[in-house]
Image: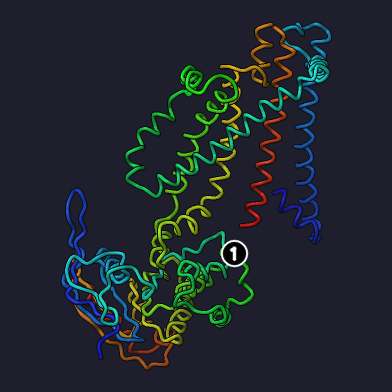
Amino acid sequence: MKRLSLKTKKEKGSIAHQKFVKKEHLKTFFVHFARVFLLIAIIGVWELVAYLNIVDPFITSSPSRIIKQTVELYNSGSLFKHILTTLNETVLAFTLSTIIGTAIAIILFVITPLKRVLEPYLIVLNSLPKIALGPLIIIWVGVGTNAIVTMGILICVVITIINLLNGYLSVSNEKIMLLKTMGANKLQILTKLIIPATLPNFIATLKINLGMAWVGVIMGEYLSSKAGLGYLLVYGGQIFKLDLVMTAIVILCILSSVMYGIISIIEKIIVKKR
Amino acid sequence: MNALLEIKNVSLTYQTLKNETEAIKNISFGVNQGEFVSIVGPSGCGKTTILSMIAGLLKPTSGEILIENEKVSKITTNVGYMLQRDNLFEWLSVYQNVCVGIKINKNKNCLSKEQLIALIEKYGLSGFEKSKPAELSGGMRQRVSLIRTLALNPKILLLDEPFSALDYQTRLSVQNDIHSIIKSENKTAILVTHDISEAISMSDKIIILTKRPGTIKKIITLNFEKSLTPLERRENPVFNEYFKTLWEELQ
């Protein structure tokens, strides 16, 4: 709707149309306004009830306390250490699981018997709560970054494989047959048809993966960590410093939105290039 | 002179876990260079199976298929296959779509870039080279699909109900277009259809198959004046007679 109204704006139509366009613009504006207003209202009410002691800011924290806490972390020099630790682990888990997952999905697609053999294993792995593997991970790969990234990968990789494979299998048989009649081999079918045809699915998988990578990394940091936002969450909870917990949550919100935004930009570039 | 394509006593039985189905039984016919042959018959009589065997996608259970006296044993670019849907790749431009087969075959025995551009121009697609398939009409899409098939310079074109997904109006004009392209490029074509009038308006020869297992019931040679287009044939009084004959044969 938005794009439509922008396009028609250039060539002014009848008065009725101009009215319609104006109305649509107004609607869009209202939605944006309501979004910003809601955020301000939440922050305002939160601050107010904490300030007036209607709720105990010790339990709920408050926006001003969060800012104070952030500044405190910054001054102690640990703010960016925690952010970078978690960010680093997330990017690593996300990238590795995407690469590994894509490679496995392609192998399973090309070698059909292998896919048939491994299908039940994939299903079991997918439904298994990966946190249950926590103790094993720590013993096998050691505590710290290794364990955290491994947890992230485990959470992402199975869903990546399943999503991508389903995408590959959904490409129409007719198109595959067409390429075969042109003399294409399996690799050519993959590179000329399957992968470009499922690019939108790949990007959707990236988006899911990113969310899962955050889940995995924070879960990993719960298991064992010396730094990171997950560490701050656990630590803050243990010493009952909810300002710290809230601060970590807010920073997580911002970071994950930024990374989602980056993927959306990549998506736009890829789709344009196609 | 031997025919370009020879089908000799070909039978095919499909195997599934539950049972086996005899799709084609003892079929023989020949197609000469430049001939346009249609195969009609009740649904499920194995029309598409015949095309798949000529293309090398399926191996006959018995009998053999020869193209220029050479047995068909694998998929080659001797044969170009056009399917019911145009199957254009939505993410590629018209020109890139036309080039798909050429890229796969790394330019061996294909048309040159100049020849391709000439085809695109000749068949009313110039100016659309950079468009995406979604921007084209159904008829234009089928023309792109045909040029993509012609790009590999096939000796035989297989057309598997390529018009059935189009609305009636478009179908008539696309039949005209495709027919004139095939004739002017002097290509040999085999068309599978369930539309009797389509078969009469386009072909030189019609092969009628029986119900499954498909055998040849009758082969009818059509005697229209060479220069008539499919639309002009439809206006010719002989058209109705052929229609009647075919209709009765198919009952």
> Can residue A45 be seen?
no
Q: Residue B208: x percent and y percent?
A: 24, 76
> Can residue A228 be seen?
yes
Q: Residue B9: x percent and y percent?
A: 17, 74
Q: In which image quadrant can residue A215 be found?
A: top right
Residue located 63% across and 68% down the image: B130
Q: Say which amino acid is labelled 1.
A: Lys
- Residue A225 position (above or below residue B90): above
User: Dot 1: few (<14), some (14–19), or many (≥20) neighbours within 10 Å?
Assistant: some
B73, B90: nearer the viewer: B73
Q: Residue B157: x percent and y percent?
A: 38, 76
A71, B164: nearer the viewer: A71
- Residue A197 position (above or below residue B12): above
Q: In which image quadrant can residue B199 be found?
A: bottom left
Q: Residue A165: x percent and y percent?
A: 44, 44
Q: Name the residue under label 1.
A: B132
Residue located 76% across and 53% down the image: A6
Question: At numbered mark 1, what does the secondary structure look like: helix, strand or loop?
Answer: loop
